[in-house]
Image (cartoon, helix red, strand yellow):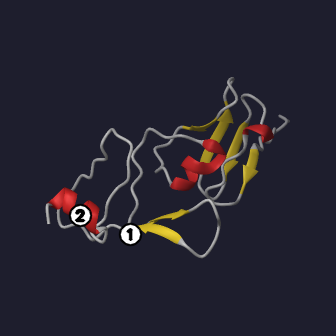
Amino acid sequence: MAHKTKIKPYRSEVATRIPSAGSMDIGELAMNIQDGKFYTKTSIGQIKELGGAGSITLQDVTANGAITDRTITMNGANFIFEGNLEDAFETTLTIDEPTADNALKLPNASGTLGTQDDALAYSVVFGS
């Protein structure tokens, strides 16, 4: 009778968890059971998702210092920025419900963005 070999890769059952480079050997396989995603550690020590066309989430991008060159789509979500101090004050970036495809481009320059409630910046931009 043939001997059956079970392959059990390093695994997690916590949604969106990506293995850390320190927890894997080069070429080792890992699986996130909840997400149905496989990962490996490359020869330069980076964790890479294998196959699939799954969507990218902010958790994917920020976990383990990951970077993506794919578009991130957020449905009904806000960006919330915490300052250097974790306290009761944050800045929230919210998008109004779009009625058309829109594009907002940030200039290739450093500076401060003005808001409608910033009278000086508003008058410089809109002349009123």
Q: Rate crowding at label 2 as few (under 14), some (14 to 19) or many (20 or more) other CA atoms within 10 Å.
A: some
Question: In the visual, does 58 lie left or right of 128?
Answer: right
Of the 4 image quadrants, the one containing the C terminus is: bottom left
Residue identifier under label 2: 122
Depth check, front residue: 84 or 98: 84
What amino acid is found at the position of numbered circle 1 in the picture? Gly
Residue furthest toward the bottom? 88
Residue drawn at 75 percent across, 42 percent down: 9
Place residue 10 in its image quadrant. top right
Question: In the visual, does 92 lie left or right of 30?
Answer: left
Of the 4 image quadrants, the one containing the N terminus is: top right
Place residue 8 in its image quadrant. top right
Residue identifier under label 1: 76
Depth check, front residue: 114 or 23: 114
Residue furthest toward the left? 127
Q: Vertical placement of 12 versus 67: above or below?
A: below
Q: Rate crowding at label 1 as few (under 14), some (14 to 19) or many (20 or more) other CA atoms within 10 Å.
A: few
Mark 2 or mark 1, which has the lower sequence index? Answer: 1
Q: Nearer the viewer, mark 2 or mark 1?
A: 2
